[in-house]
């Protein structure tokens, strides 16, 4: 008798959805969102709406006393698409631990360039994979540019015009998108208050000592001080172990705020490290993710002159 072969285990579908919606007017917008809003209400999911005007429309649909609408928790980090995605994922992961999902709605036509939104959306696809959440990106048909339309298709596996699904043959992996539209440099800050070089593992002690001194000079509390020491130490260690082995740490220190930037001459093929939470058993790839969790803003970019990481902590 021939023994039966067991079928290979099937992988559960990813609960994360990233939906692009092109709408012509408010009535069509709400008609498209209605099934998603109804499902979120039945499940008891959180609903985050970043845009004030759209938030009013959603509240009118759900009922002002529904209590389910909250603001987007990542708005303060909008200049860094990576940080926006990371912070959103952190908030969604906390909900998931309480057996809740989330619906996040944002309007792409109110602010920001198409390139900037593309970085946010591609980073979101990495950071939120596996989370029970639906992110809906809205675009007004009357004002959507060719670039915005292209990035809407590149970053969203599902695209709707009204209630109809538009076949999306232009969807690309986030790694491909970020290769075409890389993360921009962090905003210029002017001359640094302090800049020091480091080389080799032995230099990490001095990097961490300087981080503690700068964080305390800024008046951060002890938890923030330790976070600064760990984050900057991990990033410098990354340059030593996975980069050219040396680099520069620059500091901008103000009351209640400290900014550090790690620069090295190495070149990365991706600017996405640390966006996705490492597997529990993973022994590598945890440094940048940990640094993202410990800081308010962490932005990584690469260019002809090397690789750069900006990290900010404070009030």
Image: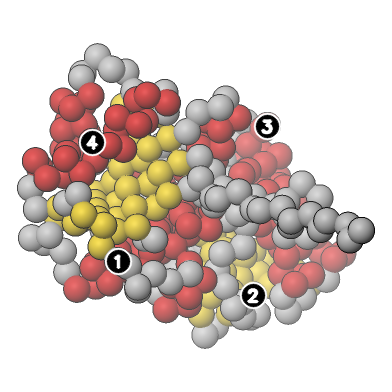
Q: Are marks 3 and 1 in contact (CB under 8 Å)?
A: no
Instruction: State how far apart marks 3 and 2 are (Cα).
Output: 29 Å
**At x 56% / y 27%, what residue is drawn?**
99
Instruction: State how far apart marks 3 and 4 are (Cα).
Output: 46 Å
Closest to the observer, 235 or 15? 15
Earlier along the polypeptide chain: callout 4 or callout 1? Answer: 4
Q: Which residue is mark 1?
A: 167
**At x 57% / y 73%, what residue is drawn?**
270
**Circle 4 Cα neighbour tier, 10 Å, few/some/many (<14 / 14–19 / ≥20):** some
Q: Are marks 2 and 1 in contact (CB under 8 Å)?
A: no
Instruction: Tell me where residue 157 appears, x and y as whole percent.
Output: 39, 61
Closest to the observer, 37 or 111? 37
Instruction: State how far apart marks 3 and 1 are (Cα).
Output: 52 Å
Residue 90 falls left or right of residue 140: right
Q: In the image, which disc is placed on residue 264?
A: 2
Q: Which residue is mark 4?
A: 34
Q: Which residue is mark 3?
A: 222
Residue 36 appears anywhere in the view: yes
**Circle 3 Cα neighbour tier, 10 Å, few/some/many (<14 / 14–19 / ≥20):** few
Instruction: Tell me where residue 95 appears, x and y as whole percent.
Output: 52, 30
Residue 190 falls left or right of residue 55: right
Residue furthest to the front: 1
Q: Are marks 2 and 4 in contact (CB under 8 Å)?
A: no
Tell me if residue 162 comes above or below residue 27 in the rendering. Answer: below
Tell me the element at label 4: helix
């Amino acid at each position: 008798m021939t023994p039966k072969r067991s079928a290979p285990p099937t992988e559960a579908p990813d609960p994360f959805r990233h939906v692009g919606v092109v709408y012509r007017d408010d009535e069509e917008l709400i008609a498209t969102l209605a099934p998603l809003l109804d499902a979120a209400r039945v499940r008891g999911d959180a609903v985050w709406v970043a845009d004030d005007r759209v938030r009013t429309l959603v509240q009118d649909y759900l009922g002002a006393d529904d209590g389910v609408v909250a603001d987007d928790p990542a708005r303060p980090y909008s200049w860094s698409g990576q940080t926006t995605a990371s912070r959103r994922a952190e908030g969604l992961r906390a909900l998931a631990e309480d057996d809740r999902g989330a619906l996040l709605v944002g309007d792409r036509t109110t602010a920001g360039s198409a390139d900037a939104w593309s970085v946010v959306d591609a980073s979101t696809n990495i950071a939120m994979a596996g989370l029970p959440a639906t992110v809906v990106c809205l675009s007004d048909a009357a004002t959507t540019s060719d670039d915005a339309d292209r990035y809407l298709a590149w970053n969203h596996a599902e695209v709707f015009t009204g209630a109809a699904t538009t076949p999306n043959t232009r969807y690309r992996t986030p790694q491909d998108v970020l290769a075409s539209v890389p993360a921009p440099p962090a905003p210029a800050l002017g001359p640094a208050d302090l800049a020091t070089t480091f080389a080799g593992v032995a230099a990490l002690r001095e990097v961490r000592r300087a981080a503690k001194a700068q964080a305390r000079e800024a008046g951060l509390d002890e938890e923030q001080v330790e976070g600064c020491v760990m984050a900057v130490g991990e990033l410098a260690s990354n340059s030593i172990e996975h980069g050219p082995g040396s680099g520069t740490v620059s500091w901008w220190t103000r009351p209640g705020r400290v900014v550090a930037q790690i620069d090295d001459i190495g070149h990365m093929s991706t600017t996405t490290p640390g966006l996705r939470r490492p597997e529990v058993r993973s022994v590598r790839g945890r440094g940048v993710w940990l640094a993202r969790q410990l800081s308010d803003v962490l932005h990584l970019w690469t260019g002809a002159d090397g690789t750069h990481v900006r990290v900010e902590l404070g009030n």
